[in-house]
Image (cartoon, coloured by chain):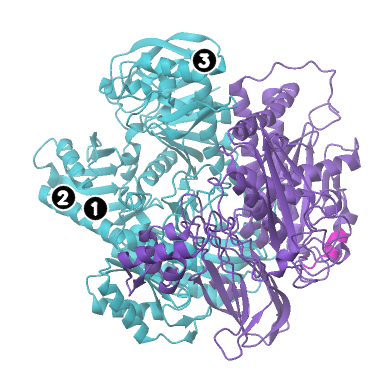
Amino acid sequence: MSLRVGVDIGGTFTDIVAIDSDGLVRTVKTPSTPQDYSIGIERGLTELFTAPDEAQQVDELLHATTIGSNTILEHKTALTALITTRGFRDVLEIRDLRMPRLYDINWTKPPPLVPRHLRLEVTEKTRPDGSISIQLDQASVDEAIRQIIAAQVQSVAICLLHSYANPDHERRIATALRAAMPEMAISVSHEILPEIKEYPRTSTTVVNAAIQPVVRHYLRSLQTRLDGMGIAAPVRLMQSNGGLASSRHAADFPAQIVESGPAAGVVGAAVLATRLGEDSMITFDMGGTTAKAGLVEHGEVMRAEAMEVGGGVMAGARLLVGGGYILKLPAIDLAEVGAGGGSICRIDPAGAPKVGPQSAGADPGPACYGRGGTAPTITDCNLVLGYLDPAGLAGGTLPLNLAAATAAVQTHLAHPMGLSVQQAALGMLRIAAHTMMRAIRAVSVERGRDVRACSMMAFGGNGPLFAAAIAAELGISRVIIPPMPGLFSAFGLLLADTEHHLSRSFRARTDHAATDALQSVLHSLLTEGDQRLAADGFPPDRRQTRLTAMARYVGQSSEIAVPLHLTQAAGILADLPCAFGIEHARTYGFSAPEGDPVEITSLALIARGVPEQARLPDSMPPGQGQAPNQRQVWFDGPGWIQTPVLPRAALTDTARPGPLIIQEYDATCLVPPGCTAARDAFGNIVLQLT
Amino acid sequence: MHDHSAPQPAPPDPITAELFRNAVVALADEMALTIYRAAYSGVLKNIMDFSTAICDADGRLVAQGLSLPGHLASIPQALQACLRHFGDDIAEGDVLIMNDPYEGGMHLPDIFVMRPAFTAGSARPIAWATTVCHHTDVGGRVPGSNASDSTEIFAEGFRIPPLKLHDAGIPNATLLRLLQRNVRLPERVMGDLRAQLAACEIAIRGITDLVSRHGVPEMQALLCETMDHSERLTRHCLSELADGTATFTDWIDDDQIDAGVPIKLVCTVTKSGTSMVFDWTGSSPQVKGAINNTWSYTAGASYCAAKCVLSINMANNDGVFRAIEVIAPPGTITNALPPAACAARGLTGFRAADCAFGALAQLYPHLVFAASDGGNTGLTIGGTDSDRKPFIYVDFMSGAWGGRPTRDGLDGNTNMFANMASFSIEVIEAENPLEVLDYEMVPDTGGPGQFRGGVSLRRTWRMLEAEGILQVRADRATHRPYGLQGGGPGAPSRNVMNPGQPSEQQLAAKLTMTLRSGQIFRHELPGAGGWGDPLTRDLAAVASDLLSGKITHQAAHRDYGVVSHSTPPVIDAPATIALRQHLKTQRGPAPSPAWHPLHESSQDHTS
C-alpha cells in the first residue's frame, strides 16, 4: 500500500487529507502550532497513521503553508540587505507612490523590508539594450560586502537597473558575495523576475530575500521531523500560481509559495471541474474572516501577473493598491473580501446596516461562542435563523449559545431598524452575500465573463452555507459542494501538478518585430522549462508547456494575456493581432478598428509535469455523520419551516427538494426552498436552482 | 422636474437601501476599472486622472468611482450644464460629450462622456452613466495641451461645448472627424473615448438590472435615499466637530507669465452645527497664465480636505455636498471667467487643497497634517531623435506628506489630492533618449517637527539626443510647504542645470528651455512641513532618521537640538538635554503655522 498526504497549515488549524492506493480517504484536523508549525504536522500525521509502519508507505507529501505570508504579516522577516545601482536605493521605499485608501491622513506605508542604511549602492550602470554605461566598480562591491558583514545581515537581495537585459553585473556581485560568505542566503533579481520595471522586480527580489531564511529554517525542521518519523517521501510545496514545486525550489524561491493555501483549493476545484465536465466555474471559498473568489475556465485556473502580500484584504476595489508588498509573480487570481463568519454586523450613525470589515475573530468570537463577545456576527445571524445547529459546531465540540446570539441581534440590529430578529438577521446575511458577490463579479463580470453561464464550487467552513443564496442572486443555476468542504485546500493539494512559471521581457510591435529575436526568446523560455522539468525527473513525454504573450494595442497602457498555440515566431506574429482583438473584445466589450497595431510586452511559459496516473480518485466516500433529524429553520417568505437535517450520506443521485440542511463535521450546507440537492457519483453535493 | 403624478412608493427599508447603495457604488467602481484597464493614456493609468459616476435624472451625483479626489465636484457640474443645454431633447441611445471649462468642464484635456439610462415607455431618463478622462492631447499650441504659459483658452486646444457624440445611437461623424483632425494623437484619443463608452455601457446594463429588480418609482426612492443617507452621515460627522471660523492664506510662487509675482489663495472655513462652508473670497484675481481653476476644481479641493477631517469615509455623492457649501467668487483664480487659460490648473487645485487644510488645521489641530509637497511637478521633454522620429516624455513627480498629529509625514507617497503612481526608470530609459542618473530621497529636506515632514525626492536626467525642449511646472520654490503647531516648513523645490559641475546653475521653478546633448537636469521636489515642536521629538526617532540618512548630524543639532556623532549614530543624551534647554530659552514662541517664505516680498501682497 502507498499513501499520498496533503497538509494545509492555516493560522488556526492544520488540515491533513490522505488517500491510499485503494482510494480510501482519511482526514485529520488539528490545532496549528505557530511557534513551530512542524510540531502540529507531526502531531497530525501521528494521528493519521493507523499502523506503525505507515510512515514508510507515504510516497508523496504535498504541502501548503502560510509561513511566507505570516512571516511578513508578523514582521518576522530576516535582517536583509539590498545591493543596488548607485542613486536608486530608495526605489524600494518610494514604491510606486500609490496609496490604497483615500482621505485618510493616518494611512501609513508598510515599512520597507530592508531599512535604508542596509540598502547599499554600487557604482555601475547597464543600459536598456544590455550594453554597459558604467563598468562595475569592484571597490564599491567590496565596501557593500564589508557593511553586510559588519551589520550581521542574514539575507541579501541584489537588484540592479536593467539586469533583465544583461545580468552580468548582478552575477559578478553574487559571485563575490558567495566567495566572501558561502552560507549567505542570496536572492538575485534576474533569476527571480527577468522583466523590465525596477520597482516590482526589486520588491519581489527583496520579499524573496526577507523570508528566505525563515522559510528555509522551517523546511529544514519539517524535513528533520519527517526523517524522524521515517517518512522518506519527497516534500512538494504549493506555489501561489497553483503548481507544485520541490522543497528545494521553494527554499530558493520562497516568494513563490506566499499564497500557498488559497491556491490549493482552487487547483482542487479546477481538477474536479474537468472531471465533472464543467467548462466555466466560479470557486467560492469562505472561512471565518474572509471570502475569496476565483475562476476556472476549460480546466485552467485564472491567473493574475502580480499580487500584494501583507496588505490585508483586497477590498473588492482593485483600483486602490499599495497596501502591501508587491510580488510580480504569477498567482492564482483571487478576489478577496472581508466577510466571514466572524464579521461584525452593526448600524451606522445614519441608520444603515453594515457588515464587517471588523471581525470578532476567534477570541472573543461571535456572541454565540459565549466567550464575552456581545457584537452580533454573521455566525450569530446564521444561528438565530436555524441555519447552524444550536447543539454546536464541529459535531457539538464547539457549543453555541442561541440566547446570546438572539440578544445580540435584537439589541444591536433588529431594534434599531424596527425589524424582527429574523428579518434583521436575514438582512445582514443578504448584505454579506452582496459583499461576497463583488468578489465573484471581480473575477467574472469585470473580465467580460457571463457569470450565469458558470457553475459554482463552494467550500471553506462557511461557503456551503451561503452558496445557494449567492448563486440565486447572480443567476448561477448549479452549485457543487465538494467532499470535505472545510478541508478542501488540503484535498486540492493531492490533485495538483508540478509547474514552473517563467517569463521574459520582450517589447515589440507585431508588425515590426524581429522574428529572430522573438524566436530566440521563445527558445530560451522553452529550453529552461524543459530543463527544470527534467531536473524534477519528468521524462519528455510527461512534460507540457503553455505559452502566453502579454499584449496591448500600441499606445495602450495595460496588457492582457493571450494564449499562444504556436512556438514559431513568424506564425505567432501573424496570428497575434487577431487573437488579441478577440480577447480584448471578450474582456472589455470592445476592440479597436482592424489594423490598429498590437505590441507584445512580455512572454510567459508554464512548464507542467504530468503525473503517471490520474490523481483524482473515482469517488469519495461521504463519511458517516449523524443520524437524520429535523429543526425549525427560518426562510424569507414562509418564515419558520420544520426542516430535515441530513448527513451527506443520506443524499442520493435523485434530486431532493429544499428546504434541507446537510450537516457535516466541517461545514453546513443550506438548501433553501426552490432549490434541490443530490449527491453525484463522485460524492459532491449538487444544488440545482430553478 | 419630478413627476409628482405617480404614487409615491413606501420609503425603502434599511436592508434594501443598503443593498442598493452597495450595488450602485460597485457599479461606479466597475466603470472605473473598465477605464483603468482599457485606457491608452498613461495619464489615465498612472495618475488615475479620470472619474466615473452614476447620477440621477436631475444630474445629481449618486455614486462616484474611487479614483481622483480632485474630480469630486466635477461630474454634476458637467451633467447639469448639458441638461440645461439640451432640456428634454434627450433620447435613448444618445451619448453626450463636452470639455468646455466655461460650460461645465474643468480644462480641455478632461473630456466628459455621458449616457442616459431609460426605462421602458418613459420619455425621461431614470439615471445617467457619466465618465470624465484626461486625454493625452486635445490639440492647441503644445503637445499634451497642458502648457502653463498659455494666456487664453483659445491657445489650449479643441473646445467642445455640450454636444451629442451619439444621436439616438448614430455616431456623430462630423464631430469625430473634427476631433481627430485637431489632436496630435488621434488613435490614443479615440482609444480612450472607446474606454469611456465601454464604461457607460456597463453602467447602463447595471442600471437596467437594478430597475428590473426594484421597479421605477422604488428605484427613484432608492436613489434619493442613497444621497439622503450620505447627507445624514456627513451631518452626523460634522456635528461631532466644534463650531468655529478660521481663515488661512497660502501662495503659488507665480504663474510663469508674471514671473516672481506670488498668487494668493485665501480660504475661510466656517463650521456651524451640521454644516460647513469653504469661502474663497479674498483669493487673487484670475491670472494670465494657465493655472485658473473652475468652480468645480476649487470645490473638489474643499471637499477633499473636508472628507479628511470627517470620522467616517462615506460614499461620494450629492448628500455630502448638501452639507458642505463652497463659495468661490467669479473672476478669481478659484472660479475663472472666460477666456482665462486653465490647462495647467492642476497646480492651483493642489494649492487650494493645501490652503483648505491650513484653515481646517486652525479649527481642528489634531485632525490635520502639515503641508505636503504642494502637489506634483509636471515635466515634459520632447523633440525628434536622430531618425527624425518625434519623442515626447511626460512625467509627474510627487512625494512627501506633512508631519501628522500622531506620526511623521510619509516619505515618498502620492499627494492626498491625486492618487498617482510613479513612472518606471527603466521604462523611461527604454523609451526615450534620456539617461536617469538618480531617483532618491534628499536628506534634511523634511520640515522639522515633533513629527517630521516627509523628505524631498529628486530625479536627474541626462539628454542623449542632440536637443529637446524641456518644460517644467514646479512650485513651492519661494513659498515653502508650511509646518503646523511649531513644526518647521519643508525645503523648497529646486531645478538645477548640470549639478555638481562647474557650470551648475539654479533655474526657475517653471521653465521652458532647450536641453542639449550631455546636459544634465535635476529636479528636487519640495520637502513637506513638520508638525509640533521639533525640540520635543523623540530621541529614538531622531536616531532612526540619522541611521537612515534622512537627516544629518548638523540638522539634528540645528533643528532638533540633538547632539550626535558617528555612523551608526550615537546620541549624547546629557548634551542634548542641555542644548534643547538652551534653544528653548533662546528662541521665542514658535509661529503657528510656521511660515517662512524665502522672498519676504510675498508678505506685502497679503494686505
Q: Amino acid at mark 3?
A: His
Residue A97 belongs to magenta span: no
**Relative side of B257 to B406, left or right:** right
| Predominant SS along the magenta part | helix
Q: Which residues are magenta?
A: B177-184
Q: Earlier in the sequence, mark 1 or mark 3?
A: 1
Mark 2, residue position: A226
Q: CA distance from mark 1 to mark 3?
A: 55 Å
Position above or below: B346 against A459: below
Image coords of residue B580 (percent x, y): 40, 63
Answer with left or right where residue A427 lies relative to residue B270.
left
State which chain disc 1 sits on.
A
Q: Between residues B579 and A29, which one lies in front from this camera angle? A: B579
Residue A10's disc number = none
**Is residue A149 among what the camera can see?**
yes
- Badge 3 marks a residue whose secondary structure is helix
Q: Position of residue B413 (x, y in %)?
A: 53, 59
* In the foreground, A669 or A55: A669
**Considering the numbered disc 2 on the image, is that residue within a helix, a strand or a loop?**
helix
Q: Colour of chain B?
A: purple
> Which residue is drawn at the image coordinates 50% and 39% (left, top)?
A281
Q: CA distance from mark 1 to mark 2?
A: 9 Å
Residue occupied by mark 3: A415
Of labels 2 and 3, earlier in sequence is 2
Q: Which chain is cyan?
A: A
Q: Amino acid at mark 1?
A: Val
Check if residue B183 falls in the magenta segment: yes
In terms of image quadrants, where is residue A42? top left
Mark nearer the N terminus (1 vs 2): 2
Disc 2 sits on a residue from what chain? A
Q: Dot 3 surroundings within 10 Å: few (below 14), some, or many (20 or more)?
A: few
